Amino acid sequence: MLELRKDIFADERDDNLKEIGKGTQRQDMLGHVTGTSTYFDDHKLQGMLHLKVLRSPHAHARLRRIDTMEAERSPGVRRIIRGADVPRNLNTLLSLINFGKDDEPSLAVDKVRYKGEPIVAIVADSPREAFEAMAKLRVDYEPLPAVFDVEEALKPSAPVVNETYPKNTFVYHDVYDHQKLRFGDVERGFAEADHVLEQRYQMSPIEHAPTETNGSIAAPDTNGRYVVYTSTQALFFSLDTCAKILDVPSNTFHFIGGTVGGGFGGKVDTLTEPLAILGAMLTGRPVRYQLGREEEMQFGSPRGAERIYIKDGVMRDGRIVARKIRAYFDSGAYTRLSSYAVVKCVAHLPGPYTIPNVHGDVYCVFTNRTPATAMRGFGVTAMDFALECQMDKLAHLVGIDPMEFRILNAYRDGDMKAHRREAKNTALIECVQVAAEKAKWPLREEMKRMSSRKDGGGSRAAISPTPLEPVPQRAAVSQQRTTYDRAPAAIVQPPPPAPTPPPSPRPQAPSHGATRFSSVFGTRRR
Amino acid sequence: MTKTALQFRHNGRDVALFVDGGVNLLVALRELIGDMTPKFGCGQGGCGACSVLIDGELHLSCLTLAETVNGRAVETLDGLKNGPNLHPLQRAFMEQFAAQCGYCTPGMLMAAKALLDRNPSPSRAEVIEAISGNICRCTGYEPIINAVLAAASGGRARA
Ligand code: FES
Ligand code: FES
């Protein structure tokens, strides 16, 4: 029986772990089994209209002309919405925490950059009438060469997917076309190693396929406000995103949600709310915008694809002495959250192991594929798959049991991690020991006696000399400042109460939201 | 558009309504009658979230034209409870933790009811077969299978 490490987060909870090992009923279970849990689509509102979206059939095309004349006259049509009707038709989700540049329109204007991209929205009395009107829309496309492969997209000859990022990569720290990690000297490590192993790993995009598709219903309320029933997983994040796109103060909206028919990360992108609310604003009626299953698959963002190259140097005795990683995250046509996934991934390198020389280059790449988003552990999941496959291969290469190979290389309390923080509260060795025991996997006695709290630190706490690299020229004044390189002192203290801001129709760059994505800033998550 | 008059029994009560040609039973139940228990997951027969019983038989309401239930009996999750008392399947789903987001649950419960009504003590394989048209993306099927088996054996969990 293992002792529980109660020192972890000790200041954040009382020392009362009596719930562990007992079943505890969900508070919403009775609603689920009686069918009375209220999902967004279970609201039936008087005079509700239905919104459907014309989507691009091309992965990359210029929009020469959009003709809505015939569709406007189609029976039951209340309003046709085009890009020009969207108050701020350019946004990036993480602009709420000042991370990245606005790069994605709500409705495409000059170009479409992926198959399924929204172009025109139709609000009609019934879904059927909306579809009938959609068939009468005429769009003149000029197909453009498209790029679907992350490494192809980085070649100078590749088509530019998203003009906000002309090199097809997200820009980090205003300078770099990728996020870097440098710790020690991998080349020296490879030169000293007994074996060097380089491998390539690939993960395809993964669709969340929630049983309930994305959607929302927006309805005019009193006092010029709007009530919004939504499937979102990120209620306040969506609310603020809508306030920005629709250029109104966030107290214009009353968002109601929380009962979500499966999300897994696929319901954080505010895919439907802005157009549903805009439809309600333009018609004065409740508007429902629900994705069909095909739209959910084609347009609903997936977990992004990743390609990963790992090169390791290992000694005959099993010590990994150098690990070099180059990885490409396929963000699709727009940033959404992939920029952040890359930051998270680099912070995770080289996995839970103590390796004296680590080198990481991870790119957030734009291609003409559906924009990617969050999904259960995104940024780390595919990398861990690659790292752990690599660990098995290395163990095989040096003839060591794979469980013992992990214990040998596991980080321990007091070790220096590659991003230059001391390892604390480590428990990988104990996890491997328990996993081996449960799987009846034989470990040698000396491996069973090893502990995360013994033999760490010392020479393992050293930062080996790290060669300097030239810093590229800083780009001209950037559109938005990336704030995660702020001086840490500014973050640990709670900000002083802000003076009451003057009433402004345009939301200022908000300071909230920082705790939600706290791992970008390195602050503690609450 | 011409409307068709339609009468059927909905959870033991007679309903009469007019439907547009081509309207499916899922839309008729949710939007015209206001019974929100059957869910839309795909509208193309792929997920089972819209499952209902028609004359005791399991059907996908998204693929059933509303007009075709004229004179028949439609049961949905809304009719499963007996007054304030939960059906044994509902109790078993709660006790076995057989739902997370709950969106598949109405369809799962109707598929399970169709099974137990015709076969009160099914084998594990028969339960798996009976819910094979119902997709659950959250819970994993084991707790659901266990819940159906538990309901069949009067609340006692069976392996
Ligand atoms: S909604 Fe009927 S099977 Fe999916
Ligand atoms: S509980 Fe979410 S789909 Fe089954």
Image (spheres, rainbow, N blue to C red):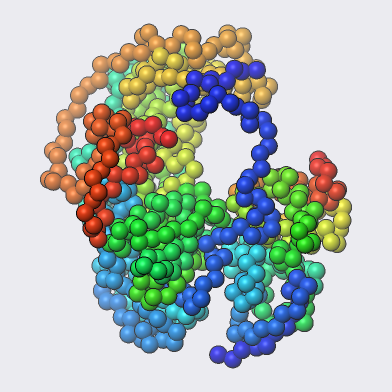
User: Is A312 situated above or below A34?
Assistant: above
Q: Quadrant of residue A486?
A: top left
Camera-side residue of A46 and A190: A46
Query: Total number of numbered labels?
Result: 0
User: Is A263 situated above or below B48?
Assistant: above
Residue displayed at 32% across by 22% down:
A420
Camera-side residue of A28 and A213: A28
The answer to whether residue A327 is seen in the rendering is no
Locate the C terminus of chain A and report the quarter of the image it occupies.
Answer: top left
Camera-side residue of B35 and A346: B35
Q: Position of residue A101 (x, y in %)?
A: 25, 50
Locate the N terminus of chain A and report the quarter of the image it occupies.
Answer: top right
Q: Position of residue A337 (x, y in %)?
A: 37, 47
Give the left or right position of residue A473, taking residue A128 as reference.
left
Residue displayed at 64% across by 60% down:
A36
User: Is A88 situated above or below A304?
Assistant: below
Q: Position of residue B59 (x, y in %)?
A: 72, 69
Q: Quadrant of residue B75?
A: bottom right
Residue displayed at 43% across by 11% down:
A456
The answer to whether residue A499 is seen in the rendering is yes
Camera-side residue of A374 and A386: A374
Residue displayed at 69% across by 58% down:
A34
Q: Position of residue A157 (x, y in %)?
A: 23, 52
